[in-house]
Each structure stands twice: as structure tokens, then as C-alpha cells.
Image: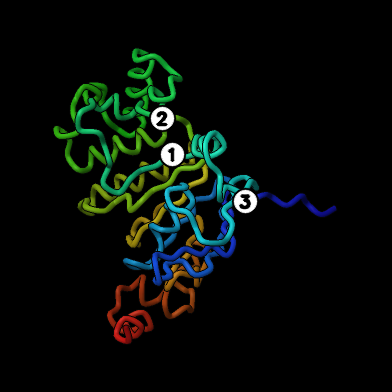
Amino acid sequence: MTPKSVTPKISLKNLHKQFGPKTVLDSVNLDIMPGESMVIIGGSGSGKSVTLKCILGLLHPESGSIKVDGNETVGLIGSNRKKIQQKFGMLFQGGALFDSLQVWENISFGLLAQRKVNRRDAREIAIENLRLVGLSPDVAKLSPAELSGGMQKRVGLARAIASKPEIIFFDEPTTGLDPIMADVINELILQRVKEMGVTALTITHDMSSVRKIADKVAMIYDGNIIWTGSRSEVDNSGNPYIEQFIHGRADGPIQMEILKA
């Protein structure tokens, strides 16, 4: 008997996005399976962030398909879009904490905005999620300005998991951190994703993050996914673009293309 095929949690087909005459995404194809941690790597301007924003619904592709749990999301508006977005959690690159709110209010912002809990319960939820990212309850009453960069990342992660999402997006999660704190954040991401059983999509150029948190890796270049494979295959991919990128070499096909431009 043939086992029933599993529907991808996220499926991108022939995704195309351009800004004026500039094509940023040419024809992106990628499937992310339930419970999988997918990391998209690529240089600046390769299309990583635009891909993420299209999935989130912040940008609208000119053509192509974005399915979540088998349901088409391109063109969704109003309550239908909101229903999809409720499956998402997000750790933003810069933390994106609200300066005017205390830490616990930042963590529970989505829950409070949707009126899912009262303020007392929201604070307790925030404190529990602070514990999950290695921060003590007294941090809850602080303002974002009182936090170090590493603490802001932890609070951002606490907010991303507070609503118990099915999918969590990580936008350059270790940018601006020293190597030790970056590893701490990567370890926290790994623990929380596995413990919650969620699907994760990370965009990064940090290979230490890739080697720590990825199940699968995809490389985007010139608006297309040019390679996908497991984390263990990255170092022996045989792909010259991958080889150049992961070793940070100036010479190679990526640099040659830059010089032509």
C-alpha cells in the first residue's frame, strides 16, 4: 500500500515578484514540510526577505502560488487573510519591540490585540514565555531600552512563541550579536521549535545558524532557488554557488556575476 502523501505546510510554486523593471523573484519553487526547520540562505539582494514578505502577505507577487496547509493564500484579504496569519509567529531582525510598552506587554501584544486574554493573564503568559527563553520574571516590567541586544532577541522570541503558532518565521535571528550570544539564540530557537513541534522558516546568511537549526537548506540566488538539501549535505553539495557562499570566498560564480553588472 502506498502511504498517503503529506501536504506541505508551506508550498511556493513559480513565485514571481518585481519592483518596476527589476525582477527580484523570478520563479521560486519550495516546499516546507510540517515540523520541518527550513533555512533559506543567500547574499544581500538575493530575494530572501522578499520571499518571506510574500508568504506573510506584506508583499503581493505578480504571479505564482503560495499555499499554507494546501490552501492558496495569494489574493486573500480581510478575515480570510487574518485566519492564515493567526498561524504565524515572527522573530524580526531588529527585535521590533514597542518602546512605549513594557516587556510583558510586548510579548503578549498579539493576544491582547485580539482580546484573547485579559491583562492579568497576559502578564502571566509573558512571564512563562520569558522563562522559556531563559529570562527571569523581573524582566517583564522593564522597557525595551533597558535590554541588551541579546535580551531583546530573547524577548522577540518569547513574543513569537506566545500565541502558540503553527509556523514561526525567523528573519536574520543572529544579526548584530556576538558569536556567543548568537549561539545562545540559535540554541533557544532549536529547543523551542523542536519542543513545540512547529514548522520554521529562517532566512539568514549566517552559516553557524544554518548548521545549528536547519533540517533542510535552500539557497536563493538571482531570484531562484538554485539548490535544496539537508543540513548534512551543505558542505558537500558540489554546487559552486553553495561552495563559494558557505566558505565566504571572493572568487567564484557569484562574484563573477557581480562584476558583470
Image x and y of residue 139, in percent: 22, 26
Label drawn at residue 162: 2
For residue 15, above or below residue 193: below
Label 3 CA crowd tier, 10 Å (few <14, some 14–19, many 20+): some
Q: Amino acid at mark 1?
A: Gly
**Quadrant of the rendered image containing residue 206:** bottom left
Kind of residue indicated by mark 2: Ala
- Does label 1 or label 2 sit earlier along the sequence? 1
Looking at the image, which is closer to me, 155 or 77?
A: 77
Where, quadrant-wise, is the C terminus in this rendering?
Answer: bottom left
Pointer 3: what residue? Answer: 8
Residue furthest out toward the right:
1
Q: Tag 2's secondary structure?
A: helix
Do labels 1 and 2 touch, CB within 8 Å?
Answer: yes
Q: Is residue 224 above or below residue 55?
A: below
How crowded is the residue under tag 1: few (<14 C-alpha within 10 Å), some, or many (20+)? Answer: many
Image coords of residue 180 (percent x, y) = 23, 50
Q: Secondary structure at mark 1?
A: strand
Quarter-wise, where is residue 219 in the image? bottom left
